[in-house]
Image (tube, rainbow, N blue to C red):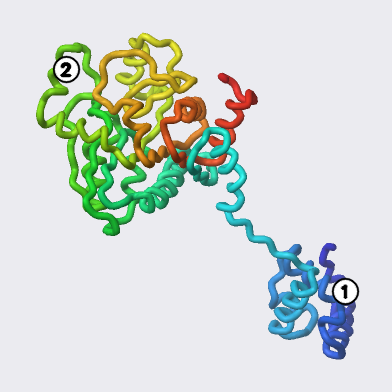
Amino acid sequence: MKFHRGGARTGVLKATTRKRKVLSQSPEDDTEFLFTVSQMYYIEGKTQREIADYFGISRPLVSQLLAAARAQGLVRVTVVDPATRFKGLEDEMCSCFSLRRCKVTPSVPDPERVRMRVAYAAACLFEDLIQNGDVIGVGPGRSVSATVDLLNELRHATGLKVVPLAGGTPHVAGSRQVNEVARDLAAKIHAECFLLNAPLYVDDPSIARLLMTDPSIARSTELWDRISCALVGIGALDAEDPYFMARVRASESQEIVADFCGRFFTQDGQEAGGKFVVAIEPHQLRKAREVVAVAGGVSKARAIRAILRGKLITTLVTDEDTARAVLGLEDGRGAGT
């Protein structure tokens, strides 16, 4: 119903008549008037003061009338909690991919805002998963770095150790080395940090074997068998990183869709062949109590599905559009299945 004030005299007459009617009987007895006031407030966007002035009544009485309308069921106010709104989607992801938990955030058009929303949700979740004596693994990637930046300082767990899950790569604008991220995480949770001073990719197998026997490197890599909690990212094929794409082209596999902790994976979640890498083995990561992956953006849907198919993580934090895209790929609704 639209609000029409009408002519000045008619408006005054209506207001006077309505005022007398309101004052002569209880608001709860005038359903028509409650309905009119409610429409003016909730649908037409009138303020309580505007409604009061129009009918020649007090603003507190307008508030009383609106409360009466809600009490009688003429007005129903629904507040949708995003956590509740995504519950069905999260449950579907967990059921489809045997996840322990899935956290979905609202999607937005800006990829950087998606990254920060997903990282914030991951930080809140990861804080609650850390336990006394945990050996915590940290994977490379901008989403992991953002998650660590958003973590609160924690003191509830003791005897913690932090170690990178992969060696270092040439610097790419906008990203940090995994050792830096590990150091920042250790500082925030008051843990001992074990740096991994080795490159991720090694061309010569003999050099790779020699690196792995170095005491300073072995001190860190030996912890990989004891990882109890890990924070990792999931990477799609990133054309913005020429070094990375050169590795993809040089790989023995032509079916790579995901980069996970420095290793390549096919769409079925199997590790693709390639050069020797200084990175945690999939079987080592699968032994961990918790592996939390933080990855948002529809462009990562195929990569995320590959890692989910490989049963490499226990928890996924992503955004709504990406979660739906992953499910669409899995049931054949999306391209590239």
Q: Quadrant of the C terminus?
A: top right
Any part of residue 53 in sight: no
Label for residue 209? 2
Q: Is residue 93 left or right of residue 281?
A: right
Q: Is residue 277 left or right of residue 143?
A: left
Q: Which residue lies most toward the bottom here?
A: 24
The image quadrant that residue 75 belongs to is bottom right
Q: Nearer the viewer, mark 1 or mark 2?
A: 2
Q: Residue at x 84, y 85 (%)?
A: 22
Q: Residue at x 44, y 38 (%)?
A: 314
Element type at marker 1? helix
Element type at marker 2? helix
The image quadrant that residue 16 belongs to is bottom right
Three-letter amino acid code at disc 1? Glu
Whole-percent x, y for residue 317 in the image: 46, 42
Q: Residue at x 83, y 71 (%)?
A: 36
119 vs 98: above or below: below
275 vs 125: above or below: above
Whole-percent x, y for residue 6 in the image: 87, 70
Q: CA distance from mark 1 to mark 2?
A: 85 Å
Q: Quadrant of the N terminus?
A: bottom right
- Residue ID for mark 1: 32
Label for residue 324? none
Q: Nearer the viewer, residue 286 or 323?
A: 286
